[in-house]
Image (cartoon, rainbow, N blue to C red):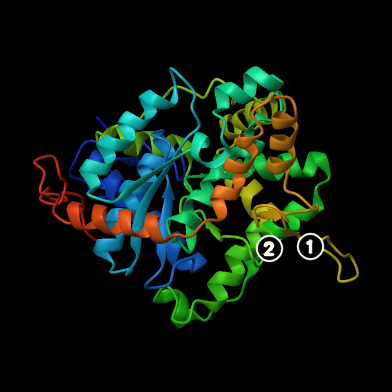
Amino acid sequence: MVECSDCSVGVAKVKTAKDGLPRCSDCFIHWFEKDVHEAIERMAIFTPGDRIGIGVSGGKDSTVLAHVLSRLNKRHSYGLQLVLLCVDEGIKGYRDDSIREVQKNEADLCLPLTITSYRDLYGWTMDEIVAKIGRRNNCTFCGALDRAALRAGCNKLATGHNADDAAETVLMNFLRGDIGRLQRMGAAARQPTDKATTKQLGNSGSGTASAVAAETGDDESLPRVKPMKYAYEKDIVIYAHFGKLNYFSTECIYAPNAYRSNVRSFVKELERVRPRAILDLVLSGESLRLKAHVSQPKLGKCERCGYIASQKFCKACQLLDGLNDETEDNTKCQKGLNSATRTNKSMDEENTKRIEMNNCGGRTECGCNKTDKSLDF
């Protein structure tokens, strides 16, 4: 038997992917949460008072992110308002099952949950869109998460992207020659922050806002933050296993992408030969800089829905126009993206009621009274 490298008492249950050290289950939980906390401090992505929308799909990454952020927010007094955001695309046999897992996590974490549907935002479900145009450009509509976050009154959106995802994206951008995206990744990572500000997760938040805006590509867009950007996918799976977390493991039937799949296979092979390769790819992408004289196009706003766009209308509005031009019911177009720009008043009132209900829940399944058994640090 191999002893735990951290406590030297427990029996090692796993060798962590990121540093290769053997750890017992308790020490692994402690190490993983500490690693994410240190990354959050280093990136200075949060400011006390932020209303953070956590994108949850019921999958392992978003489930682990929600649990870790909830724990760290309490343990280190981040001062964040956390809201779970889920998008129901209307995919029968897939999303309905995953939403059930999201609702279980809502009860466990006692956090407010907002579910926004494609039907509400666009007037179409994903199944209807695919039936109309086939399996192409389907994920163009995935800006729904940003729209849902804005409607819920969030000022930042947290996603469960991990180091493996980031490494794949860097390599894909290299292969495509997409210097714009590479530049934005690098600019976000290099954003200077005061040491004291970093340690306290930001005082004014100005540096943080510009850093995350750089990664999203536009100062007017909703900033996205990735607290688990340096966490390996294998370690996330282990954390979910040791934490006995509820998550949905089936991949979306519309998700397969031949290009990313090939890149993913290559990255996995690199990891097998040299585990450090994943982190090196991420850091390489962050270190790139454009020469001063190289200009990049600046994103504007869609004239119809107000969402960020590189043309007069955003891609989603363009596709909706195409869909609605082929149907007699043109009222769907009016019901679609225009609804994303409506006032947040009704949504805020709904969220307030849910927060009051979830404070201790008034429900037997509420997770407020559950003891956090993970090690402190």
Place of residue 242 in the rendered image (x, y in percent of width and height, measured from the top left): 26, 35
Place of residue 279 in the rendered image (x, y in percent of width and height, measured from the top left): 58, 47
Residue 91 vs residue 328, the one in the foreground: 328
Asked whether disc 2 touches disc 1, contact meaning CB atoms under 8 Å apart, the reply is yes
- First of labels 2, 1 by sequence position: 2
Quarter location, residue 268: top right
| Label 2, label 1: how far apart the Cα atoms are | 7 Å
Element at label 2: loop
Q: Residue at x 56, y 55 (%)?
A: 341
Place of residue 270 in the rendered image (x, y in percent of width and height, measured from the top left): 63, 33
The type of residue carrying mark 2 is Asp
Quadrant containing the N terminus in the rendered view:
top left
Residue 252 vs residue 357, the one in the foreground: 357
Circle 2 residue = 218
Q: Residue at x 10, y 49 (%)?
A: 362
Element at label 1: loop
Say above or below: 352 vs 16.
below
Circle 1 residue = 298
The disc placed on residue 197 is none
Say above or below: 374 vs 318.
below
The type of residue carrying mark 1 is Lys
Q: Residue at x 47, y 44 (%)?
A: 18
Q: Is residue 113 visible?
A: yes
Image side of residue 184 versus residue 227, left or right: right
Image side of residue 35 versus residue 364, left or right: right
